Amino acid sequence: MRVLVPTDFSESASHAIRYAAKLASALKGSSLMLVHVVQPSVSRNNIVYPLITEELARFRKEASEKLSNQCDLLAEENRIDCDFQIATGDVIKEIGNVARAYDADIIVMGTEGATGIEKLMFGSNTSAVIETAPCFVIAVPENASLSLPKKIALATDYENMDIDDLKKLCGLCNVLKAELTVIHVSKESRKSDRDLIEDFSRMVANETTCSQPYYYVVVNEDAAKGIESFIESNEIELIVLSTHKRSAFSKLWHPSLTKKLVHRSKLPLLSIPVEG
């Protein structure tokens, strides 16, 4: 796999880099790419842009030296291939461009502080990357454990789960030797939910290399409380969100849910690409 990590040289970004390096090392044959985006304060069309090109060159040179040193250290410590790129322009757009050019399988990004998930889902660079990324995105809070997950929970509505994405997730679980649990939060126990599980589990068995996942319907009026309760009682180490329709994604991750899950900010979150 190809693992891409955007960095602004903050502590949260450095933490995400360490997590990504461990992940790349575990995924044998994987490579790591660091990317730093220099964002000019004015556009190329601005009359003063030529006056700041020298300063931009200095920023790029300094960033190149930092990234080169980081890559050398990461490659030696984790026995992986590591490279870096420096881009200039809009942060979100350039991260997407690099991800596509690099053919990244996973983007790993850091989030800050106790409100990591809140920042992740609303208004942050990580949120914007999640909404536009061509691949999986793992958001790693700065206080998250660097241990790779052994218990992974996939929260899904079943109906919008793409089989190719599921195959990638199963591949990740197999390499990490991680237990996969598929959960669905419902306001009431319904036979239709059980039917969905049966159909979904049959598809998983027939079309993926997944070891048999566990399946649960969590009955709770509040989606946040349902997910929160399950995470706590099952010692989940990575939560995966799978909703491909943007309307459904917005419905699942509304502000009240996010606030209720803020205290779970130590938990890394893997997002499957969201369709527009």
Image: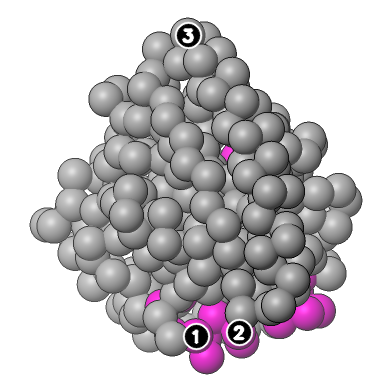
Q: Which residue is mark 1?
A: 246
Residue under the image location 60 percent in, 73 percent down = 44
Crowd tier of the residue under label 3, counting other residues whose Cα lies within 10 Å: few below 14, some 14–19, many 20 or above: few
* Image position of 160 with respect to 60: above or below: below
Amino acid type of the residue that numbered disc 1 sits on in the rendered structure: Arg
Q: Is residue 11 left or right of residue 161?
A: right
Of all residues, the one furthest to the bottom in this rendering is 247
Specify which label sits upstream in the sequence, 2 or 3. Answer: 3
Q: Is residue 243 magenta?
A: yes
Q: Position of residue 164 (x, y in %)?
A: 23, 62
Q: Which residues are magenta?
A: 235-258
Return the mark for residue 55.
none
Q: Name which residue lies at 81% across and 79% down.
A: 256
The amino acid at mark 2 is Ser
Report the side of 1 relative to 37 (left or right): left
Residue under label 2, please give it: 250
How far, Cα to Cα, is label 1 from label 3?
41 Å
Give the residue type that dot 3 points to.
Glu
Q: Which residue is mark 3?
A: 76
Crowding at dot 2, Cα within 10 Å, few <14 / some 14-19 / many 20+, comes out as few
